[in-house]
Image: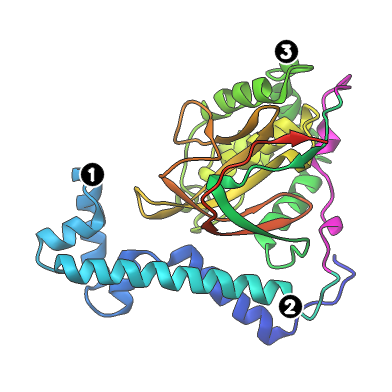
Amino acid sequence: MSTHPKQPERQQGILKKIKLYLETCRIGDLMVDKGIISADDLTAALKLQRETRKQLGQIFIDNAVLSQRDLTVMLWKQRMLRTTATALLCFMSLTAVSKKARADTIKDVPAAIQLANVSTEFARVGVYPAIYGTQEKKSGNLQAFTKWSDMFSRFDRQLKDQASNALLREWQQNLQSLKGQSIEAMANKVNDLVNEKRYVTDNKNWGKSDYWATPVEFLQRGGDCEDFAIMKYTALRSLGVPEERMRVAIVQDLQKNIPHAVLIVYAENGSFLLDNQNKRMLSAETGSRYKPIYSINRTAWWLHSAPTGGTILASAQ
């Protein structure tokens, strides 16, 4: 239980609504909300999308539900609303009445399962390459990110369970051979190992649309994109990779037009994106598929805004 005062009830409610909007604001949801189509129409269109692999917007155009112009306007409004909602969430988080909700209230649980004899010391990073060249605004106030903090709390409780510990020890055997390697080499292998696990949607796994699973839960049941990212984060942390060199990033997948989660790792020669949708690591400094919204680790979070147009390389102090 937190010893810090909570935000006023009204402000908590507003934050909850904003976060809910960010999680569910998709083109189909907007059309249902505006009365353009019914929920049954959306279900049928999503089924057709899975069968044909067409963009949802194109299906609506083909069926004369929307014109190309109407779709363009709606997508533009969707992007503007997301940007506004994200900025408002950032503002309210940074100006919350309870400014004492610091990151140090989240226990470093992954460090508790660090492999024995991990003694490699990595140089501190002086300059971090911007994810996809975006501008970043940092905050140490993590109070709004309850799914993230709740995941750590559940993970901490699960470590006291004998069966969970046995499962983690079995997993750690896969990591033993990676000890002492470079961050890039470890990240590459961890990406391969975790991506072999089963992808399962939150609705099927947990009966809800957005559940952040612990590594124990992921090993037991599989998971979706953020669960893959959290498992990779934990695996690298257990190999001694400092938290400052990792972030879970929530991005907008511009190809699928849905939110997505990846792990960003700041290695010796730049930053890399570990993604369950790609078999190999990719550069986190350039790319066109993802638009970063925010990134987070146990100590802070960063709001991402429009690209600066430049790219910088990682440098150690």
Q: Which residue appears at 49% of the width and 56% of the height?
A: 207
Examine the rendering and report whether any part of residue 164 can be seen.
no
- As drawn, is 40 to the left or to the right of 199? left
Name the residue furthest front. 310
Is 281 situated left or right of 35 in this image? right
Identify the image quadrant of residue 60: bottom left
- The residue sitting at 53% across, 41% down in the picture is 223
* The disc label shown at residue 95, or none: 2
- Identify the residue shown where x is 68% and y is 18%: 174
- The disc placed on residue 3 is none
Chain-order first, disc 3 or disc 2: 2
Distance between mark 2 and mark 1 Cα atoms: 43 Å
Nearer to us of marks 3 and 2 is 2
Q: Amino acid at mark 3?
A: Ser
Task: Indicate the quadrant where residue 3 lies.
Answer: bottom right
Q: Residues within 10 Å of mark 2 (few under 14, many from 20)?
A: few
Identify the secondary structure beneath mark 2: loop
| Mark pair 3, 1: CA separation | 40 Å
Q: Of discs 2 and 1, which sits in the foreground?
A: 2
Relative image position of residue 290 (x, y in whole percent):
45, 48
Q: Which residues are magenta?
A: 101-120
